[in-house]
Amino acid sequence: MTQRGTSEELRVAVIGTGRMGADHVRRIHQVISGARVTAVVDVDAERAKAVAAPVAGCTAYTDPAAAMAAADVDAVLVASPGPAHEAALLTAFEHDLPVLCEKPLTPDAASALRVLQAETGLGRRRVQVGFMRRYDAEYMKLKSLLGTGQLGRPLLLHNRHRNVASPPGFSSDMLISDSVAHETDVTRWLLGHEITAVTVLRPRPSANAPDDIQDPQFVVFETDGGAVADVEIFVNCGFGYQVQAEIVCERGTARVGDGHAMVTNMAGRWGGTIAQDYTDRFADAYDRELQTWVDATRQGEVTGPSVWDGYAAAAVCEAGVRALEEGGRVEVELVERPALYR
C-alpha cells in the first residue's frame, strides 16, 4: 500500500457515526495504537460534528467521497448502514484505500458480488470485513484447537445466539440477515467448509416477541465438508446477551461462550453475570479486530475476513430468508471462488 502522507500513524476516515461508528472512533482515539481518526462522515451533519469534536484534527463530512479524497486520509472504516456499503467500497477502490467494512459487506448477494468483482479487478485485496467473532479469545482458541486435529473431523456445530430484546423495526427476516449472519461466518471459518443449503424451522413464537416477529428460529446449515451446523436464534429472550458454540468431532467436543469467567458463591446462592449487549460481550474482540487491521494496513497488508467471506455470508443469508419465508430446504448459490481469495 502506498499511503498518501508520511505520517507514522494510519489516518482513518470513519464513515457512519451511529452507535457502531461512534464506538470505533472512541476505540481508535482511546484504546488502540498506531492510528488516529482524521475524518468522520454522516448524513446527519450535527451528529458528525459532535463525534468529531473531541478528536483533535478530525474533520466532519456529510459526503463519503469528499472524506476519501482528503489528503489526510490513508484508510477507511465503513460503519454506515448496510445499503450504503457498496457505494462507499467502490469509492474507496477508486482511491486505492484499504478498508475495514463492518458486516454486512452489502445487504444482498448481488451487490456483494459486484464488490467482489470490483476488488478482483484490482488484482489485490483492499477490504477486511468486520466479522469480529474471529477475534474473540474463546473463538480463536476453539479455531486453534480444531487446527491441531486432536478432536478429529468435525461432525456437528451447535450455535446459540440470544439477545435481550429486538430493537424497533426488527423483522423476522432480520433474525437471519442481521443476526445469524455472524453464525454463517463462524460456521464457515471454524469448519473450513462452504455452506451449501439452509433450512429454517419455526417454533411457536415467544410471548415476549413483538406480534409480527417469528422469534425464536432454528436454522440448519449443511456444508460441503459433510458437517451439519445449527443455530438457535432468539432475539427476545429477556434475560441477557448470549453467544455460544459447541463443536462435536469424531474424538471429542469443545464448547465456548459459557461466560463463566467468574462464578460467585454468597448468601446461599451461586452464579455470575450475563452480558446485556454485544458491545460488552465482544469488547475485546472489537479491540483486537481493529488493532489487527491497523497493524496489517501499516505494513501494506490485508488480512482477516475477505470480500469472498462477505459475499458467501450474504448468499447464505439470502438462502436462509427464502427458507424462512417459503419453507423447506434452500440451496446456496455461489459463483466460482476467484483465485484472489483462495
Image (spheres, grey):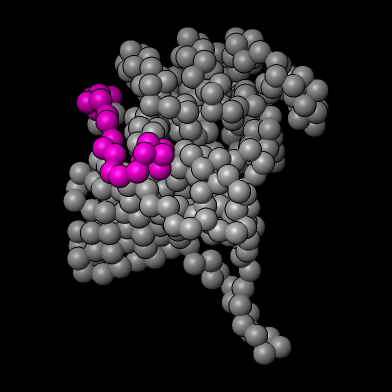
Q: Quadrant of residue 9?
A: top right
Q: Position of residue 211 (x, y in %)?
A: 61, 48
Q: Which residues are magenta?
A: 321-340
Relative to 305, residue 337 above or below: above
Horizontal and vertical percent position of residue 170: 59, 41
Q: Is residue 55 visible?
A: no
Q: Nearer the viewer, residue 84 or 293?
A: 84
Please tell me whether residue 195 belongs to the stretch shown in magenta: no
Residue at position x 49%, y 19% from top? 86
Q: Please name whichever residue, 254 or 241, is drawn nearer the observer in this view of the structure.
A: 241
* Residue at the image position 68 percent from the left and 37 percent from the top: 19
Question: Is 105 displayed left or right of 17 in the figure?
Answer: left
- Image position of 285 with respect to 150: above or below: above
Q: Is residue 290 visible?
A: yes
Q: Position of residue 261 (x, y in %)?
A: 55, 69
Image quarter in which the N terminus is found: top left
